[in-house]
Amino acid sequence: MRELATFPAWSWSAESVATWPARFRTYFEDRFTFRSRLLTWRTGFLWHQLRTPPASAVFPGKAGWLFYAIDGGIEDYTQTEPATDSQLEVWRQMIDRTDRWLAARGIKYLFVIAPDKPMIYPEFTPESIARLRDDFRMDQLIAYMKTRSPVEILDLRPALLAAKSSELLYHRYDTHWNDRGGLVAARQIAKRLRDWFPAVRVLEREDFDEVPGVPSGDSTSMLGLVDAGKLAMPGLVPRNGWRHRVLEPLTPSPYNEDGRVVTHIPGSDLPRLLMFRDSFASRLIPYISEDFSHAVYLWRNDFDTWEVERARPDVVIQEFVARHLITYVPYPQAIPDP
């Protein structure tokens, strides 16, 4: 899923001449004819014929499901290293300090954790990989914060677990929720925001039509596997059209996978939003943008006071996928004292 190498620029400098062959080789290995098709064939053969994941980035589950193994995915699932009290305390300090800094400026703050796929579909996780605890770091942090902090962490799992019997919320080969799961999550966020901003609407499933050809999941499946069920699932499109418009970037990704996304509702007096986020928020952006006159989404987990002053929001949302509670190192000292 990384960006492919571009053709190396030529220059007569000694350094450029010396490194050009290696740079060209990287370009060629990324771009040679039929590369994507060959990778797809190889992946399909290993998985469909041999039931072997072609890379260590995933681990296989039941009924042909795949789950993310890197970026903290396997560690969070197995819980081989539960969070210590000292680690949880650093998280509390970061969250509380962020909340106080924003409150001093009249800005609301919402901390949201997006659940990984094994949390919502444990019935498809493999029996061959043992879990050492019944909870996750997410549970540990929520419990710790409830007894030590006034900041409430929004737990999206109850709503997703309740909704999964109605329709598929995560695809078999994707790591993120699809547009159905994103809508369920966005509804919970809107319900929480409405406590502060009564004008915020809670979108209903009935507000959307299912339109074939509109994507419903990630831009790509894990390892490039073709998921026929995903391709057949029509995407959700609002019956009355989207109210918001994308201002940045000029040519936005249809999956909202740009590092900075700015949306705007012309003539609206709704509140302004700034969200620090990771890839899980990509499917939230279309829904959440319907409730803000101006919204800025930054693909970064780090809170940045300069970005807050630049965006002038009424509310800041900080979204973390649950597995990043293992890989991300909070640093409360980076947030100025309120």
Image (tube, grey):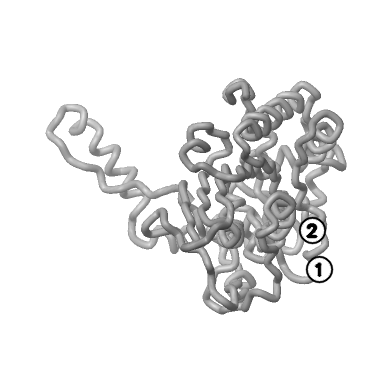
When asked about the image quadrant of residue 327, the answer is top right
Measured as percent of width and height from the top left, residue 245 is found at 46, 63
Q: Is residue 212 above or below residue 186?
A: below
Residue 165 is marked as: 1
Answer with left or right where residue 214 lies relative to residue 102.
Answer: left
Q: Residue furthest left?
A: 12
Q: How many other residues sit within 10 Å of disc 1, few (<14), some (14-19) or many (≥20)?
A: few
Q: Is residue 206 left or right of residue 283?
A: right
Q: Amino acid at mark 2?
A: Ala
Side of 257 where 185 appears, left or right: right
Q: Residue at x 66, y 34 (%)?
A: 103
Q: CA distance from mark 1 to mark 2?
A: 11 Å
Lateral position of residue 73 relative to residue 36, left or right: right
Q: Is residue 73 visible?
A: no
Checking the image for residue 223, the label placed there is none
The secondary element bearing badge 1 is classed as loop
Q: Position of residue 48 (x, y in %)?
A: 63, 64
**Above or below, comparing residue 89 to residue 207 in the picture:** above
Asked if 125 appears above or below 338 in the picture, the reply is below
Residue at 77% in and 40% down? 152
What residue is at 58 percent from the left and 72 percent from the top? 231
Q: Earlier in the sequence, mark 1 or mark 2?
A: 2
Foreground of the two, 230 or 283: 283
Residue 250 % position (x, y): 37, 57
Type of amino acid at the residue the image marks with label 1 = Ser
The kind of secondary structure element at disc 2 is: helix
Residue 176, given in percent of the width and then of the height, sits at 63, 55
The residue tagged 2 is 159
